Amino acid sequence: MRGRIGIILGFVALAVGPAAAQRSTQIVISQPADATTMDPGRSTQVLTVNYFFNLYDTLTRWDAALKLHPGLATSWKAINDTTWEVRLRPDVKFHDGSPLTAEDVKAVYERNMVPGKTVVQSGFATLESVQAVNPTTLRIVTRKPDPLVPVRMAQMGGSIYPARFTSDEGARELARKPIGSGAYKFVSWTKDDQLVMEANRDWWGWNGKPPAVDRVIWKPIPDDFARLSALQRGEVDVITNVPPDQMKIVRTLTVSSTRTLTFWINTTQPPTQDKRVRQAMHYAMDVSSIVKDLYAGQGKPFSGGLADTDFGYNPALKPYPYDPALAKKLLADAGYPNGIDVTLSAGIGTIVNDKQLLEAIADMWSKVGIRARIEMMEMAARQKVNNERLLPPNGVMLINPQSTLLDADGSLWRLFHPNGFGGKYWIGNQPGQRFHDLMEQARYTLDSRKRKELYTEATKIIHEEKPWLELFQEVVIYGVSKRVSFKPRPDYRLIVSEMTLAK
Amino acid sequence: MRRLRWPLLLPALPVIVAVAAALLAPWVAPASPTSGNLAARLRPPAWISGGSGTRLLGTDLLGRDLLSRLIWGARISLLIALAATVLGAVVGSLIGLVSGYYRGRIDRVVTKLIDVQLAFPFVLLAIAVIAVAGASIPVLVIVLAIGSWVGHARIIRGLVLSLRERDYVQAARALGADTPRILFRHLLPEILSVILILATFDVGRIIILESTLSFLGLGVQPPTPSWGSDLRDAAAYVRQAWWTSVFPGLAIMVVVLGVNLVGDALRDALDPRTQSRARA
């Protein structure tokens, strides 16, 4: 028997050998899901945007340390409170050979500014108009003074493609056959099987060095276990979403991410209307044990609504400790000595170990009298709750938001704004309330010290009021083969031009 | 009806154990099935180093006692299987009885319905129903019953089609017996043993189906223990903690095997046709 296996392995080695040699400059990346589109205006989904940031360029970009760098723009400056002048890199060509000019940028931004045309409009809502002064000069005019314009140029949706794709018909073509100016160009796409990209040797960002990776194959594998096995067998080089408790079995790269795990609560009706109840729910969760035992120590408890990578993060706010006795007392004080009933839900696949996380919390809550019914929803159902703001009273739903701007404005105010995903669930964000006024004021304040002060007070309100329950800041975990190295990015972006291969 | 022979006891053993576990769960389970200790997750069974005497089969992904999960899981799995089997058998047999007896238009409608449902993949049907109605135990029972009534209806209909021409039925009719009396006093007793045998096999099949649905996340919702959902949660941990998937899998296998063997034995004992064949 053993002999036969040896022979079979021999044949396999023969078959794989030449292929392995051939793919010395090719890598295979596996995420849990395929891209849903190639149109950067139509998705902000964390796995899908990974394709965009390899195919397309943005005017500015973050490096792996989240420092802002020039991209297609070489320089930018505010010429008055509401006007920014941006100089574009000259002689940049799209993958089809056509030149990239200010007209293309203008067309893309204008498409993004129209409500309903794209899913990235909220990030461009402060813009009034975009003017192409000449092929390499652009003027961006904002409605009110907006300090975040340079950052908005790097956000999701800021990817630039030729102006002809900004029509509805053009966008449909772009969604299937993307043309950008990025480090990698599109070769082919077989839905749910593989997407192939090839290095764009004319890219401006190589800085004279040849690309380390010539060819990238993206192969979605939904099942965690199968994805890990594929990496172990050497079929793929990079995998995303490695469950923390499986980290030991593969080589991993990790970094603390910009995403935070939180629970939406509908606070508009009893019992969760009372902040003592929400605080009790918090004190009854042993977050440090969850991080240590369920997530293998990968995660950082937080409070105040912001990740430590966001502008406005308030390090003075300490996460609530585990204190079941205090939780019981708070519940009794709020008038619920016999506990409360809640529904604890999550979209299947929101994060690794999501079901276990919910079960662990339901178990902890049961010890102080919070009775939780668990509901695992299909992603489509969860999306519906999100988009239509359908979270019922007593509903508690797992989310993992990140700031799209690495700034309080891109998370706290994107989500808690009266029109944001969580706007309906909390009275504290309505006009006239302190939190609302602080956030609106900060949005249009150019002085960053003043903004910081405003956010310091706003995050304190979140810490005290707990309009959502705050678990921990996630850690990005990649599984990688021995030959690939790169610096993992906190913003979850997987950028192939930043990778190097061992010889 | 012939005496049940002793070899029946052997296959019945796992069934008896599972039923006893289900009935006595609150008293025999050594720990809570839903409350665990995260710090003690994925501990191996007692006989492996690192295991503990109080956690006989080890702990699961959330540090809950695996044996207690299995015992309480038996309660849920068997309860659902029995309820769905009874519901399916009653509804299916009634439809088969009526359809076979009346023939004509009712029969044509019923046979079409049966054909349509047999052509429709059950899991797809279950996903559709559960997506609309939401996953809960009553919904699950109804879905599983929907999956099992067809078998009863088809076989009972066939039997009744031939039985209704028998002399004794004709005689009853000639003597002025009304239809309900003929159906329930003359035909039903004749086919009761067949229904019983069919239902026994159904229990096994439905345990598997319920596990399948729970495995797909459509069945019993957490934290309620069920063999199928435990198996699913454990699937990713096969390499690190084999016991978390092996024991629930084993439980399903042994119990279903037991139920099917009991079904075989029942058939041998009750079905006159297999008897005569065996004698010939």
Image (spheres, rainbow, N blue to C red):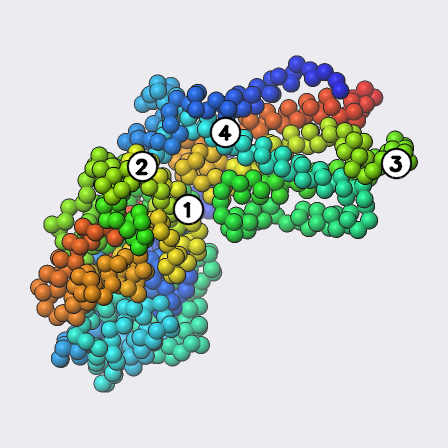
Q: Is residue A300 above or below residue A103?
A: above
Q: Residue reaching furthest top?
A: B6
Q: Measure the C-alpha gap from mark 4 to mark 3.
A: 48 Å
Q: Is residue A448 left or right of residue B84?
A: left
Compare marks 1 and 2 and give the one earlier in the sequence.
2
Q: Position of residue B170 (x, y in %)?
A: 89, 35
Parent chain of label 3: B
Question: Do the residues marked 2 and 3 share a common chain?
Answer: no
Nearest to viewer (mark 4 / mark 1): 4
Residue B266 in view of the camera? yes
Residue shown at the point (14%, 49%) measured from the top left: A317
- Residue type at mark 1: give it: Met
Q: Is residue A111 above or below residue A61?
A: below
Parent chain of label 1: A
Q: Secondary structure at mark 2?
A: loop
Q: Measure the C-alpha gap from mark 1 to mark 2.
A: 26 Å
Q: Measure the C-alpha gap from mark 4 to mark 1.
A: 22 Å
Nearest to viewer (mark 2 / mark 4): 2
Parent chain of label 2: A
Residue A246 in view of the camera? no
User: Which quadrant is the C terminus of chain B positioned in?
Assistant: top right
- Residue type at mark 3: give it: Gly
Residue marked by disc 4: B75
Q: Measure the C-alpha gap from mark 2 to mark 4.
A: 28 Å
Residue marked by disc 3: B176
Q: Is residue A335 above or below residue B52?
A: below
Residue marked by disc 1: A376
Question: Do the residues marked 4 and 1 share a common chain?
Answer: no
Residues at marks 2 and 4 touching, judged by CB atoms closer than 8 Å: no
